[in-house]
């Protein structure tokens, strides 16, 4: 089971800042998620262990939050390895996150 904690920070037009309450999310289907090799120049592997077969979605964004890549993936029960082609990305630092709650930094030299 994957457990994630989220809290939102909002900034008003007048510059005042407010924080939301903390939200705890539990993702029962996915556990043991990893991203390798990292850094990676041409492709990276997303490894996920799924308790049951189903679908997930991964998204890659740049450091400004701009969505650069998004794809639905089909998971089998057990170990899954998804190869992600990075050839369309420039050198830089990116965030890969999944709908199931994983988030990881990836570096393309």
Image (tube, rainbow, N blue to C red):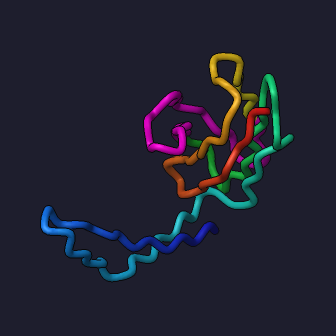
Residue sitting at the far top:
88
Q: Position of residue 79 (x, y in %)?
A: 79, 46
Name the residue: 82% across, 40% down: 39
Q: Quadrant of the C terminus?
A: top right
Closer to the camera, 47 or 43?
43
| Magenta run includes residue 64 | yes
Question: Is residue 3 found left or right of 31 in the rendered image?
Answer: left
Closer to the camera, 42 or 28?
42
Q: Is residue 23 above or below residue 35?
A: below
Q: Position of residue 52 (x, y in %)?
A: 63, 51
Residue sitting at the far left:
14
Name the residue: 49% across, 74% down: 5
Name the residue: 60% across, 54% down: 103
Image quarter for residue 28?
A: bottom right
Residue sitting at the far right:
37
Could you tell me what secondary structure mostly forms the magenta stretch?
strand
Name the residue: 73% across, 33% down: 82
| Magenta run includes residue 95 | no
Residue sitting at the far front:
14
Closer to the camera, 49 or 67?
67
| Chain part drawn in magenta | 57-81
Q: Quadrant of the N terminus?
A: bottom right
Q: Is residue 92 above or below residue 53?
A: above
Image quarter for residue 33?
A: bottom right
Q: Position of residue 51 (x, y in %)?
A: 66, 56
Question: Is residue 97 found left or right of 47 in the rendered image?
Answer: left
- Number of numbered tags placed on the structure image: 0
Q: Position of residue 17 (x, y in %)?
A: 25, 75
Question: Is residue 55 found left or right of 7 in the rendered image?
Answer: right
């Amino acid at each position: 089971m994957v457990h994630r904690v989220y809290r939102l920070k909002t900034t008003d037009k007048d510059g005042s800042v407010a924080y939301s309450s903390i939200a705890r999310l539990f993702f029962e289907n996915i556990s043991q998620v990893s991203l390798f090799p990292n850094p990676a120049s041409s492709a990276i592997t997303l490894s996920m262990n799924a308790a049951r077969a189903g679908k997930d979605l991964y998204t890659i964004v740049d450091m400004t939050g701009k969505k650069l890549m998004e794809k639905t993936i089909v998971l089998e029960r057990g170990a899954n390895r998804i190869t992600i082609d990075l050839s369309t990305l420039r050198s830089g630092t990116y965030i890969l996150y999944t709908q199931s709650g994983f988030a990881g930094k990836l570096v393309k030299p």
